Image (spheres, rainbow, N blue to C red):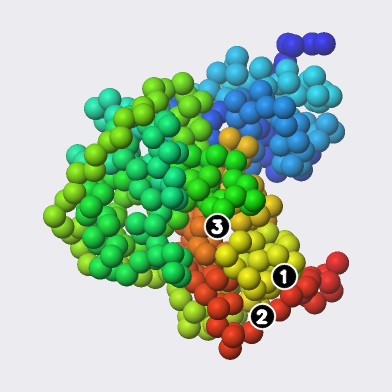
């Protein structure tokens, strides 16, 4: 087997950008792919059209399945690039062992591609809101990480009814926040402005505090009494959305959550950090009311050609086979809702997450949405059963800079509790017709 891979020049690569059989593969971290300048390159982001396949993933037993899900097949011509030749060759060797033979290496990304505006790049518009463990570590160590100009921050470990998830290991200095602080269990909607103000102040958060949010994935099981207690990774996004709605100007999410901190090999603390309350949140709540819609607005959106109500639930939930929750009896879906498939069930988001729990490559999410008419020129309100998965789908659209993205906060729970609201089951006729 030949481990000496041919190199390709910048001009040759540029000439192949629109070649359908050529797959450009970025094996840097997902954070570098999104836009972070991890090696002080001139421009952040990735080569236009490149797929994200970090070196880290090549150690996973499911690596080839990830590759095939990205429609990278042995017949393709592969061009692999990274920050250094060594990392590119490592991934190229794994491809070679998997039966891929047409592989070249590109080694001029920093000095030629990113340094020249002629060569196109792409970037996640709000990439700075997804941070790396290295970025968080610099913050903790008193350094001034990139894209940060504040003088006060707080790291928040998010969970639902599960302080043990925090106490058994968290990022040093992080406080814990139960999702119940920001959402009410009677409705599972966000709490009132007065309650949100009180909760944020009790946690030491003002409108101008930089909040770094993360959660811990703990293998949710639907058979548990409270499956969401093991889904802190989604709960963190839920809290992020509500904080943004309330008026926290800068909420950042640790991409990959606690798992990414562990993978980086950093110190883990079990100290129960005390919260330091503040006197005043600083602005009126909500400061960004447009990112949440309620039932009346949701009904108008269903009737509008300029809007989508997007159901971010599993297929069995969407067609009414199950409700998805042990506390929701009724099954079915809201008529007219577009299917925005989350994954397997109410506590997993496989279709929006990578295997290491980082946010999925944004191009892939966008392509999946476009196939069902979810586009940036429309007002899209994402919903699920009670708001967690809907918040995560919303967050993907928000990161992409979509101007009219919202969460339908009531979701199926509130909708189905009103006997006057219509619902339907089975496969929609439009889906049957399109098959």
Camera-nearest residue between 344 and 142: 344
In the displayed structure, 301 sits above or below 140; it is below
Residue position marked by numbered label 3 in the rendering: 389
**Mark number for residue 5?**
none
Residue at left 50%, top 62%? 387
C-beta proximity under 8 Å, tags 1 and 3: no
Quadrant position of residue 316: bottom right
Quadrant position of residue 100: top right
Label 1: few (<14), some (14–19) or many (≥20) C-alpha neighbours in 10 Å: some
**Mark number for residue 320?**
1
Residue position marked by numbered label 2 in the rendering: 423
Label 2: few (<14), some (14–19) or many (≥20) C-alpha neighbours in 10 Å: some
Rounded to the nearest angstrom, the CA distance separating label 2 from label 1 is 10 Å
| Residue 235 in view here | yes
What kind of element bears circle 1? loop
Pointer 1 or 3: first along the chain? 1
Locate residue 414, reporting x and y percent.
52, 75
Pointer 2 or 3: first along the chain? 3
């Amino acid at each position: 087997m030949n481990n000496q891979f041919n190199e390709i020049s910048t001009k040759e690569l540029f000439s192949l950008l629109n070649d359908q059989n050529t797959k450009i593969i970025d094996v840097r971290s997902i954070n570098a792919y999104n836009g972070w300048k991890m090696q002080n390159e001139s421009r952040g982001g990735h080569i236009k059209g490149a797929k994200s396949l970090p070196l880290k993933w090549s150690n996973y037993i499911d690596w080839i399945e990830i590759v095939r899900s990205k429609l990278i097949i042995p017949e393709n011509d592969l061009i692999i690039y990274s920050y250094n030749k060594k990392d590119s060759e490592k991934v190229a060797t794994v491809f070679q062992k998997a039966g891929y033979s047409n592989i070249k290496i590109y080694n001029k990304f920093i000095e030629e591609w990113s340094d020249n505006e002629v060569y196109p790049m792409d970037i996640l518009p709000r990439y700075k809101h997804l941070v790396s463990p290295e970025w968080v570590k610099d913050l903790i160590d008193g350094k001034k990480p990139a894209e940060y100009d504040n003088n006060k921050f707080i790291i928040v470990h998010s969970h639902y009814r599960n302080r043990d998830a925090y106490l058994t290991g968290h990022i040093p200095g992080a406080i814990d926040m139960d999702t119940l602080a920001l959402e009410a269990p009677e409705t599972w909607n966000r709490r009132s402005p007065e309650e949100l103000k009180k909760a944020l102040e009790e946690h030491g958060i003002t409108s101008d505090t930089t909040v770094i949010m993360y959660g811990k994935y703990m293998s949710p099981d639907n058979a548990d009494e409270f499956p969401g207690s093991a889904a802190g990774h989604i709960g963190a996004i839920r809290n992020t959305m509500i904080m943004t709605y309330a008026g926290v100007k800068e909420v950042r999410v640790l991409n990959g959550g606690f798992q990414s901190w562990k993978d980086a090999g950093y110190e883990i603390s079990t100290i129960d950090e005390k919260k330091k309350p503040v006197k005043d949140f600083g602005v009126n709540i909500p400061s960004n009311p447009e990112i949440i819609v309620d039932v009346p607005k949701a009904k108008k959106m269903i009737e509008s050609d300029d809007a989508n109500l997007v159901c971010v639930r599993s297929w069995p939930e969407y067609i009414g086979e199950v409700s998805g929750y042990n506390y929701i009896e009724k099954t079915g879906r809201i008529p007219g809702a577009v299917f925005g498939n989350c994954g397997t069930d109410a506590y997993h988001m496989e279709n929006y997450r990578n295997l290491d729990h980082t946010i999925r490559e944004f191009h892939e999410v966008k392509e999946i949405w476009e196939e069902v008419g979810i586009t940036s020129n429309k007002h899209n309100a994402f919903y699920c059963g009670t708001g967690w998965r809907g918040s995560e789908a919303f967050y993907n659209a928000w990161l992409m800079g979509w101007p009219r993205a919202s969460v339908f906060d009531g979701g199926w729970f509130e909708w189905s509790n009103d006997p006057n609201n219509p619902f339907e089951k089975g496969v929609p006729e439009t889906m049957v017709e399109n098959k």
